[in-house]
Image (tube, grey):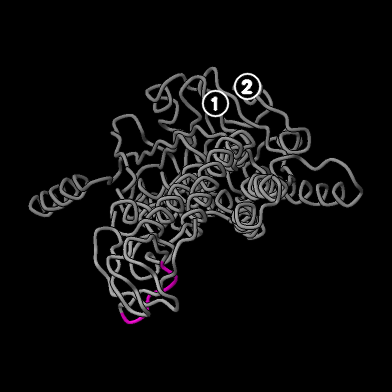
Amino acid sequence: MVKIRCVILLFLFLFSALPGFGKIARISLDSTIDPVTAGFIVRCIDQAEQDQAQLFLIQLQTPGGFGTSMEEIISRILSSEVPVVVYVAPSGAKAASAGFFILMAADVAVMAPGTNTGAAHPLMAIGGFPISGGEAGKTLTEKITSNATAYLRSITSKRNRNVEEAEKGVTESKSFTETEALKSNLIDFIAASESELLDTLDGYKVRLFSGEERILETGDQGFVDYEMTKREKMLAVISQPNLALLLGLVGIILLYFEFSNPGFIVPGVIGAICVLLAILGFSLLPVNYVGVLLIVLAIGLLIAEVKVGGFGVLGIGGIVSMIFGMLILVDSPDPAVRIGVYTALALTLPFAAILLILFIALFRSLTQKVSTGNQGMVGLVGVADSEIDRNGRVKVRGEYWTAHSSTSIAAGKEVKILAVKDLVLQVEEVKE
């Protein structure tokens, strides 16, 4: 009997020594809610379940993000077998827009002093500007607001939170301080630090979304931090709309420079890498293809301005088209994840100026007279080295050439080259 107890104790000791077993899994999220963020949180909850963690803690600070990514995170939180605690911290942090929904979906919602949440009204916008006029725009906005409110209501009612106050975060874009959120029964408690959070959670009864109840034991538990992989970190960086757009524009300019000046190699390599990274970044974002077409149209108009000469009309049209294309390129009205007006202006004007300069240089080079080969000889003026009686010899650019003329030309006279055929110059006398 004693041996059996020893074996059991040894087994429990070894099992508890495994990474994450019985401990508190923790991540820190300080960014917008996007597909990369959603994938990271889902992966970490999966890992917390495998590790049989005591609970999964999300320290949250976000201005908002994409609705589809938010729904993916909430869906995984609601199905989690490990209690999920969302802690808005540190002081000064906020969980706005999509962050408010995630906070309401948590098994335990906590905020630090000096934080705020809410402002979750769904926006409808074109080119970064909210739609407010028109009966159609009003109806569409009401439908989206109603859908968002129903989604939030279904979550908060199951979590036994104040549905009416939560709805105000959507319908009235209301924001709540930590004290207001606690008083309105939107969060469970306020914690000034993680140690205070763990003290409060020790012995705390949690009811999961499935209805199962758990008693948390956090008194002697340590944290196991889950970090983004190198791949996730790279994707998180390049999936930022502004950076992805900048990479794309720089890549286009470098590739154009390489194609118009073959042999430099470095601009072509860097440009190709930039374009591919931009494509990868935009593949993670909801892209509006009308925005893509507007940018392509803008490049075409800038080329036409130089080629045709539109007296500035085509160039201005190209700049305007590119600005609007950038503004609606990322299909999200949330200011946290879309390309802003000032960013679009800051990128468009230099890009347009550089393209115009390169195109002007290209078309000028195409219209310049050829200065090499047989064609480069036409139009040059030389001197008859001998009398040319139908055939003779001339000196051009320090070289002696066999020449042919339909008229007689005396030696020493200046001649003009009319054509080159079979290494014989067709010439005529230059009349004074």
- Residue 419 part of the magenta-drawn span: yes
What's drawn in magenta, residue-wise?
417-422
Which secondary structure lies at badge 2? strand
Q: Position of residue 240 (x, y in %)?
A: 48, 44
Q: Is-magenta flag for residue 215?
A: no
| Mark closer to the chain start, 1 or 2 | 2
> Relative to residue 89, is residue 312 depicted above or below?
below
| Marks 1 and 2, how far apart at CA | 12 Å
Of all residues, the one furthest to the left in this rendering is 3
User: How packed is label 2: few (under 14 Cα within 10 Å), some, or many (20 or more)?
Assistant: some
- Can you give x and y, in whole percent of width and height, for residue 194 in the image? 39, 25
Tell me if residue 180 can be seen. yes
Which residue is disc 1 drawn over? Answer: 189
**Can you identify the residue that label 2 sits on?**
177
Question: Residue, x 66% and y 21% (percent of image)?
Answer: 180
Looking at the image, residue 243 lies above or below residue 195: below
Instruction: Out of 24 and 256, give the one closest to the viewer.
Output: 256
Q: Nearer the viewer, residue 71 or 420?
A: 420
Which residue: 61% across, 29% down? 117
Q: Nearer the viewer, mark 1 or mark 2?
A: 2
Locate residue 106: give its quadrant: top right
Callout 1: SS: strand
Residue at 41% of width from left, 56% of height from top?
255
Do the numbered discs 1 and 2 sit on residues whose CB atoms are within 8 Å? Answer: no
Residue type beneath disc 2: Thr
Callout count: 2
Q: Residues within 10 Å of mark 1 (few under 14, many from 20)?
A: many
